[in-house]
Amino acid sequence: MKRALFPGSFDPFTNGHLDIVERGHALFDELLVGIGENSSKSSLFSLEARVEAIQKSVMHLSSVRVITYKGLTVNACNDNGCNFILRGIRNSADWQFEHPIAVMNHSMSTAIETVFLAARESNMMLSSTILREIYRNGGNISAYVPVLPISSI
């Protein structure tokens, strides 16, 4: 069975994330959307709100589950029987950030391969960081997210 983990903080889960999940759903027998608790990030939306929003966003995909985890992504893969990590790449900056992580993950567990999917043109500019700033400052982000999490602010 080909099982993959799509890790992220998903704060918020964007239309770009959903596109990667939908495309990954076609590639793997099971896809886990893993919300990692990142100690270096200050979340806008609560973990519970993000889980609920993602579950609502992917309910049409039968082999997609939402999980949460702490610690290393490679450990979450091992704990959940995933041999693949799925990542979306929007631009060269994403590649420069993601590639060394993929190499390190593989060196920690050689059974895990990272699969990169290029963002569709319509999603290349979507950034959770930018959307958080828009939302914090009273802007409407509903056009960029499949389901708006209930705010924890």
Image: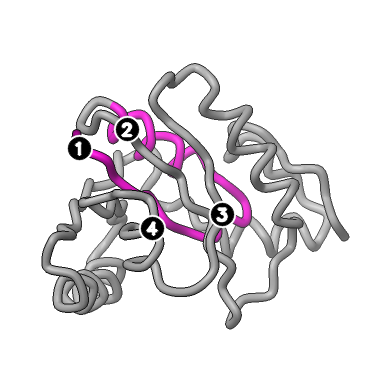
User: On the rendered image, what quadrant is the C terminus found in?
Assistant: bottom right
Q: Position of residue 8 (x, y in %)?
A: 47, 58
Badge 4: how crowded within 10 Å, few (<14), some, or many (20+)? few
Q: Position of residue 32 (x, y in %)?
A: 41, 42
Q: Is residue 22 left or right of residue 149?
A: left
Q: Quadrant of residue 73?
A: bottom left
Q: Which mark is residue 68?
A: 3
Q: Which residue is mark 2?
A: 30
Q: Secondary structure at mark 4?
A: helix
Q: Which mark is residue 79?
A: 4
Q: Is residue 111 magenta?
A: no
Name the amino acid type tagged 3: Thr
Q: Nearer the viewer, mark 4 or mark 1?
A: 4
Q: Quadrant of residue 101?
A: bottom left
Name the amino acid type tagged 2: Glu
Q: Secondary structure at mark 1?
A: loop
Q: Is residue 22 left or right of residue 138?
A: left
Q: Is residue 68 left or right of residue 122?
A: right
**Residue at mark 4 to residue at mark 3: CA–CA distance:** 12 Å
Residue depicted at 38% across the width and 36% down the height: 21
Q: Nearer the viewer, mark 4 or mark 2?
A: 4
Q: Quadrant of residue 17?
A: top left
Q: Position of residue 7 (x, y in %)?
A: 42, 56
Q: Earlier in the sequence, mark 2 or mark 1?
A: 1
The reply to whether dot 2 and dot 1 touch (C-beta < 8 Å) is yes
Q: Which residues are magenta?
A: 1-25
